[in-house]
Amino acid sequence: MSLQDTKQAIKHQLTSIYDALELNSIVNMLIEEVTGWDALHQNIHKNDAIEEAQLIQLENYTQELLTGKPIQYIIQKAWFMGKAYFVNEHVLIPRPETEELVEWVISYAEIINKPLSIVDIGTGSGCIPIALKLALPNANISTIDVSSKAIEVAKQNAATHTTTIHFIEQDILQTKQLEDKFDIIVSNPPYIPNREKASMQEQVIYFEPAMALFVSDHFPLQFYSKIAQLGKQALHKNGQLFFEIHYDQGQAVLKLLDEMGYTAELKQDMYGKDRMVRASLKN
Ligand SMILES: C[S@@+](CC[C@H](N)C(=O)[O-])C[C@H]1O[C@@H](n2cnc3c(N)ncnc32)[C@H](O)[C@@H]1O
């Protein structure tokens, strides 16, 4: 069977669960994983025959996709700022919005132009601290997660990308004081109220770690409040908080931070949605 026909057959099986655009990129990712050919080479080799063993592997992957499992967990790989990260069921799949948060931190750090100490709260795959370390090699970077399994994954990614990061396994909600002082505290914490589960994609609810996503309906800003409270003691003079937020929590997060003694600004993501907040303590 030619590569072209194989792709068509896979698409045919998956049309019921993905739209055309998503399907194209998913099938390209699958083929790349199995053959090593990127999209360009898949086009060059479109008439080549696919080996039997590769067909079997592709069929297995297709069956897993039919269960709704995200492609990133199937091939155990996700991309973040142009780099590949190992991912498994213990970590959130890094999102493009978070790349924008990291880019914002990097632009700020470049203006400050001195080696900074940065802590990331909610490590997951390690995408935030590792991307920051790659862009800001002189920065001192720590990261905190309550999940030992997530920290294991992030350590593996830090080794793959040859970055030195200080990993701390800790429940931030139970933390009275951070171990150190920092110029920047960055976080993409859990922020989706439990009540939104009902309207979310099954792929997210069933496969991504609930601990990484959901917060109580009663106090959805719990992580921002806790981190801002810790920041009062842990931020150096002119230190900054950088948060990723739920698109409809922008005004609420600004209000919370204002009441806690911070000056805060909101930033929209590439879709024009409120998605990031930066804050520093009022003088
Ligand atoms: C939204 S995910 C972000 C992961 C990663 N930074 C990213 O952007 O892809 C939130 C992370 O916070 C961690 N987390 C949840 N509750 C926590 C707590 N109480 N203390 C520390 N980390 C926590 C989760 O394990 C998860 O890795």
Image (spheres, grey):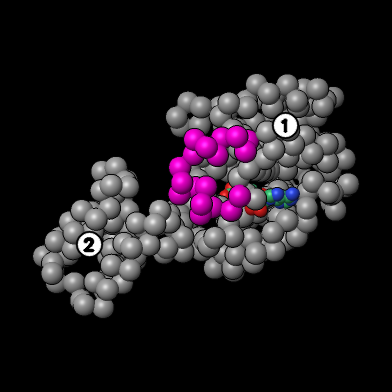
Instruction: Confirm whether the magenta stretch covers residue 134.
Output: no
Q: Where is residue 239 in the image (x, y as percent from the top left)?
A: 77, 37
Residue drawn where x is 31% and y is 62% of the image: 62
**Side of 262 where 254 appears, left or right:** left
209 within the magenta span? yes
Magenta stretch, main secondary structure, is helix
Which residue is the site of mark 2? 41
The residue segment tinted magenta is: 193-210
Callout 1 amino acid: His
Q: Answer whether residue 87 is visible to the viewer in this image.
A: yes
Q: What element carries label 1?
A: loop
Quarter containing the N terminus? bottom left
Say whether residue 187 is left or right of residue 197: right
Pointer 2 local density, CA inside 10 Å: few below 14, some 14–19, many at least 20: few
Ranked by sequence position, the earlier of labels 1 and 2 is 2
Residue sitting farthest toward the front = 198
Sort mark 1 into few (<14), some (14-19) or many (20+) by Cα contacts within 10 Å: few
Task: Give residue 279's position: percent from left, percent from top.
Answer: 72, 30
What's the CA distance linking mark 1 and mark 2?
51 Å
**Could you tell me which residue is drawn at 78 percent across and 56 percent down?**
170
- 171 left or right of 34? right
Location of residue 230 (image quadrant)? top right
Residue 126 position, x and y percent, is 61, 57
| Residue 169, placed above or below residue 80 | below
Say which residue label 1 marks. 218
